[in-house]
Image (tube, grey):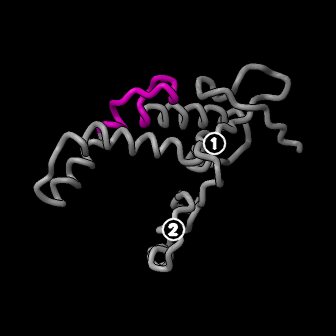
Amino acid sequence: MELQLRSDHGSQYDSSDFMNEMKFIGLNMSKAYVRSPECNGVIERFHLTLEEELLQIKSFNSLEEAQREIADFVEKYNTHWILHRLDHYSPLEYKRRYVEELKNTQAKTSGNIEPENQFVLLLSGSIPRKKGSNKQRGKPFGNAPFVDPSV
């Protein structure tokens, strides 16, 4: 799975300078769908939380201090913040549990799917369920629609 930058359709992301920089560092763009704020909703909420919890209440004396404080906030957010959308787990605990569940599922099948690739499916809400069953394979990881692999 390649690393991509998700953005909206703002003019700064379409500028030639920005696109040249993206090409230079070898990063591809993934544009959010027009009039679909849920595409960027999770990161937009994170940015608002960062703004409210750190940037509006603290002044920084240098760029290094700001980078250090933001890195500390991100580390605490990923390890200690309990999020409703992640079934009341921190982001890292949720990912750990998801990867564990995926490995258990793979042990029962002949599939050879990398956990990192599957985590993208998790975020898009498309974890498949067993055909003919209301019980989810990835439980407690959200309400996923049934996906028939034969289609």
Q: Residue furthest top?
A: 134
Mark 1–mark 2 Cα distance, whole angstroms, equals 26 Å
**Residue found at x 58% / y 31%:** 101
Instruction: Locate residue 99, reporting x and y percent.
Output: 54, 37
- Circles 1 and 2, Cβ within 8 Å, touching? The answer is no
> Is residue 56 left or right of 141 when viewed as pictured?
left
- Mark 1 or 2, nearer chain start: 2
The crowding category of the residue bearing disc 2, from other C-alpha atoms within 10 Å (few below 14, some 14 to 19, many at least 20), is few
Residue flagged by tag 1: what amino acid is it?
A: Ser
Q: Is residue 94 above or below residue 114?
A: above
Instruction: Locate residue 38, reporting x and y percent.
Output: 59, 42
> Is residue 20 left or right of 65 when viewed as pictured?
right
User: Which quadrant, please, contains the C terminus?
Assistant: top right
SS at circle 2: helix
Q: Pointer 1: what residue?
A: 124
SS at circle 1: helix
Q: Residue furthest right?
A: 151
The dot on residue 11 is: 2
User: Which quadrant, please, contains the N terminus?
Assistant: bottom right
> Is residue 136 left or right of 24 when viewed as pictured?
right
125 falls in the magenta region: no
**Residue found at x 71% / y 44%:** 111
Q: Which residues make up the magenta segment?
A: 76-92
The crowding category of the residue bearing disc 1, from other C-alpha atoms within 10 Å (few below 14, some 14 to 19, many at least 20), is few
Instruction: Locate residue 31, reporting x and y percent.
Output: 60, 60
88 falls in the magenta region: yes
Residue flagged by tag 2: what amino acid is it?
A: Ser
